[in-house]
Image (cartoon, rainbow, N blue to C red):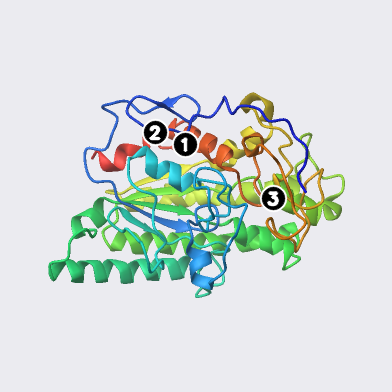
Amino acid sequence: MKMKMKMKMWSVVAVMLSSSVLFGFGVSVKCGDVCSKKAVIFNFGDSNSDTGGFAIGYGIIFGPPTGRTFFHRPTGRLCDGRLMIDFLCESVKIDHLSPYIQSLGSNFTHGVNFAVSGASNLPERKPFNLDVQIRQFLVFRARSLELISQGYKDLVKEEEFKKALYIIDIGQNDLASSFTFDNLTYAQVVENIPSFITVIQTSIRILYEQGGKNFWVHNTGPLGCSPQLLSILGQNFTGDNDKYGCIQTLNNVAKVFNEQLYALCEQLRSEMKDATIVYVDMYSIKYGVITNPSIYGFESPLMACCGYGGPPNNYVRGRACGVAGYNICEDGSKFISWDGVHYSEAANALFVSKILSTNYSTPQLNFRYFCNN
């Protein structure tokens, strides 16, 4: 059944990208503010940026209502529409990235998406964790160069691999599963964080050794504000909520992870003098939106648009959005969370507008920097 909600025009978010149209929340794409060189992006991550890898890799179809916005059909994205990686690709005027293991209809001219839902840093060699994604990249790179030498066209060339942007957005599953599946304490999770960071460190170094020079690293968001974790773990952290309703212990774990990830980026910059490593504070972006929803036209920031149980979180463990009996909001643009775990297209558009502002990046480089230098 559907929750009764007023239909309101989505007047805050403009998600069109062109040389003269505002993008997102006031970030404009000007005529001269475009890539002067071919933009190539390789993305590594989890469900926050999975454009179909999980659905194809495991043969599991994410049916309606996923994809109801923009695509108007399921696409393998755990969202009602576009993800942040889709908006980032649009900002440099390239097609959305094809999943690495998509056998039909793929276009790898401008890069590849290796992200797969559920991916984490550890344990290694588990499909499709970060180290496996890096191994897949190495195969893709070697095979591309081999085919180019045989006369194939429309593939990423060796020089383009060097000038490409390598995006890493992973870590959320390592932290969340530590609480939901491993039942670890705060101290135990914090103790494990350096091992998660080490996998990211190794991955960046491998990409650098392969000639990569541009890295875009997202930290992890406020776990304690997730409708899923609020529903599953809320009783375990009674009295531990901040004034917005988020679980402070989970958010503190995310902060510790982010501090160590920031330190890693600082360290790698000092070691890789000819590389550009941008650290993006997604935690501040997402927490700022969740705790100030009305400013951006959102309602019920801790509740899923699509799920079970209704308020306060509309999430029930073991029951996914789309399975018989689910509730769904009429206007997804009013919700930050799509299904209790993943964000709505409206939220993703807003997040990317803030990314493109450079206000949350260290150093404060424009996203198009990598295809203009």
In depth, the one of 260 and 224 nearer the eye is: 224
Of the image marks 2 and 1, the number of the one nearer the N terminus: 2
> Mark 3 sits on what residue?
340
**Is residue 188 visible to us here?**
no
Q: Residue at x 64, y 39 (%)?
A: 332
The answer for how far apart the CA atoms under marks 3 and 1 are is 23 Å
Q: Which amino acid does label 2 sit on?
A: Leu
Mark 2 vs mark 1: in front: 2
Neighbours of disc 2 within 10 Å: few (<14), some (14-19), many (20+) = some
x and y, in percent, of residue 235 in the image: 86, 53
Of the image marks 3 and 1, the number of the one nearer the N terminus: 3
> Mark 1 sits on what residue?
355
User: Is disc 1 placed on a helix, strand or loop?
Assistant: helix
Q: Is residue 34 left or right of residue 53?
A: left
x and y, in percent, of residue 306 in the image: 70, 49
Q: Is residue 314 left or right of residue 288?
A: right
The answer for how far apart the CA atoms under marks 2 and 1 are is 15 Å
Q: In the rendered structure, find residue 17 and report the number of the disc placed on it.
A: 2
Q: Which residue is drawn at 13% across and 69% down?
A: 149
